[in-house]
Image: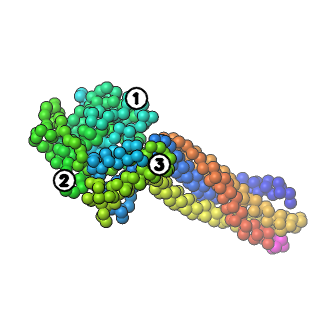
């Protein structure tokens, strides 16, 4: 029998049972669509995160002290042990371009003078170069020692009238104290600027560690303790003592502080060390210089480092690789679930083909009576199973591509289609059709023509 004639007869049989054929291919459609949609979202998420790493960020090494057995992402189990003096020493190394602390400031609210909004977190004290110039939509980086802040668009847009460069805001910290900052820059994105923050969009204010973090640590009496100290969240108000002075009650009942401390003994939750370039040799040299010093007896951090705490320094790429590994694991999990759906779909095709063989027993007998060979009957039923598999693969691929596009658009990610999975989907459709149709087609070809003609 002509192959084209086999396809024509097979298609006629499928069209004659439209609902049954549609339900038969549904398992394959769902399985392939799930694979393509979730793999597309995973690839788009990875591209979006990796795309956030600028050349400047690639030369950064992020460090924190934690129990070596602690599992989790950046800052998991972190304890503040690195002092300001340690950072000054590290910054003086030839292999290091800059070194500064990173610490979240526990806040209550921010105000632009006329309006006050809740801001429980998202106030981050760090160094000026943490906010890279190419990430600024307008304005400039803040300067250490100045009461300045850089906001992201979400933080600037929380008020009825958006905060802009040159405006002054008040930050109420946990404990009822208040301090002011001049807005000197607005970032171009609401996403986090480093793995320490994550990459989700939320309101953030970036301020220099000097004076904001130093003031908060000093107000809590944490500028020279005998153990690791955390951010000065929850600090009680202190009476004026010439250094942590409190003055000028604000209209909202908070207190303006003008604490002055040298910051040498204040410990930071995390540190950022910048290499002169993004070259791997420079980055490794900066990392080794920081680790060697902090683990030596000369550093303040060595007082707390040992069996219980160890310094970890990783680049953005290394930190993101952990996230990518999790995404890959999730993708494999989804592919496994989809494979079960494809297995169910193949069983459905095999089942419906066996039913078709039974229904068309008399037709098979007539075909053999007029000269059809076993291979002709085998080809006819196998073609029908393959058509069902290919149709399911095409519909599943189209549905998966659309679902992936809509998902990436909704989450605001760069769209990345894994075309190898698209090709695999069509291949799986063919394979499922062939494997699930082999036995029914073989059974049809083995039918005795005399028994088939007598079949009622």
* Residue 127 pos. (x, y %): 34, 41
Mark 2 or mark 1: name the one nearer the start of the chain. Answer: 1
SS assignment for the magenta stretch, majority: helix
Is residue 258 shown in magenta?
no
Q: Secondary structure at mark 2?
A: loop
Name the mark nearer the viewer: 2 or 1.
2
Q: Residues within 10 Å of mark 2 (few under 14, many from 20)?
A: few
Residue 55 position (above or below residue 16): above
The residue under the point 23% across, 33% down is 180
Quarter of the C terminus within the rendering: bottom right
Q: Residue at x 66, y 51 (%)?
A: 394
Q: Where is 404 relative to 337, above or below?
A: above
Q: Is residue 358 left or right of residue 251?
A: right
Q: Quick check: marks 1 and 3 in contact, CB under 8 Å?
A: no
Residue 72: give x, y in percent of width and height: 38, 58
Q: CA distance from mark 3 to mark 2?
A: 35 Å
- Quickly name the residue at label 3: 282
Q: Nearer the viewer, residue 423 or 12?
A: 423
Question: Disc 3, disc 2: CB below 8 Å?
Answer: no
Q: Residues within 10 Å of mark 3 (few under 14, many from 20)?
A: some
CA gap, disc 1 and disc 3: 31 Å
Q: Label 2: which residue?
A: 225
Tell me whether the residue at label 2 lies in contact with that at label 1, contact meaning CB atoms closer than 8 angstroms: no
Q: Is residue 174 left or right of residue 51?
A: left
**Disc 1 marks which residue?**
138
Q: Which mark is residue 183?
A: none
User: Percent x, y for residue 370?
Assistant: 89, 64
Q: Does residue 423 appear anywhere in the picture?
A: yes
């Amino acid at each position: 029998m002509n192959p084209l004639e086999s396809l024509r007869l097979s298609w006629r049989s499928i069209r004659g049972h439209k609902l049954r054929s549609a339900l038969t291919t549904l398992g394959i459609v769902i399985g392939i669509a799930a694979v393509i949609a979730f793999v597309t979202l995973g690839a788009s998420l990875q591209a979006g995160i990796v795309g956030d790493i600028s050349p400047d960020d690639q030369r950064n090494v992020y460090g924190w002290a934690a129990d070596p057995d602690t599992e989790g992402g950046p800052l998991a189990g972190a304890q503040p042990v690195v002092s300001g003096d340690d950072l000054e020493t590290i910054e003086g190394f030839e292999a290091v371009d800059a070194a500064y602390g990173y610490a979240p400031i526990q806040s209550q609210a921010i105000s632009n003078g006329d309006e006050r909004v809740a801001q429980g977190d998202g106030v981050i004290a760090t160094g000026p170069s943490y906010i890279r110039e190419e990430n600024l939509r307008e304005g400039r980086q803040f300067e250490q020692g100045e009461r300045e802040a850089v906001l992201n668009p979400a933080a600037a847009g929380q008020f009825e009238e958006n905060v802009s460069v040159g405006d002054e805001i008040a930050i109420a910290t946990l404990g009822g104290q208040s301090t002011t900052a001049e807005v000197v820059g607005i970032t171009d994105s609401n996403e986090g600027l480093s793995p320490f923050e994550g990459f989700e969009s939320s309101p953030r204010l970036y301020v220099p560690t000097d004076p904001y973090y130093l003031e908060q640590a000093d107000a809590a009496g944490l500028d020279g303790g005998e153990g690791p100290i955390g951010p000065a969240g929850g600090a009680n108000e202190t009476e004026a003592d010439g250094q942590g002075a409190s003055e000028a009650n604000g209209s909202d009942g908070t207190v303006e502080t003008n604490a002055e401390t040298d910051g040498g003994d204040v410990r930071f939750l995390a540190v950022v060390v910048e290499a002169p370039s993004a070259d791997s040799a420079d980055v490794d040299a900066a990392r080794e210089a920081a680790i060697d010093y902090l683990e030596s007896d000369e550093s303040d951090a060595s007082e707390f480092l040992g069996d219980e705490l160890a310094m970890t320094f990783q680049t953005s790429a290394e930190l993101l690789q952990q996230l990518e590994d999790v995404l890959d694991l999730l993708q494999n999990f989804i592919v496994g679930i989809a494979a079960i759906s494809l297995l169910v779909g193949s069983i459905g095709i095999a089942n419906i083909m066996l039913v078709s063989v039974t229904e068309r027993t008399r037709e098979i007998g007539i075909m053999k009576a007029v000269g059809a060979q076993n291979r002709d009957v085998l080809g006819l039923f196998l073609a029908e199973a393959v058509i069902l598999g290919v149709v399911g693969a095409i519909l599943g691929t189209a549905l998966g591509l659309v679902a992936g596009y809509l998902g990436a658009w909704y989450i605001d990610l760069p769209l990345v289609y894994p075309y190898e999975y698209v090709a695999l989907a069509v291949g799986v459709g063919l394979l499922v059709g062939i494997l699930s149709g082999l036995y029914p087609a073989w059974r049809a070809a083995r039918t005795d023509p005399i028994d088939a003609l007598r079949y009622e």
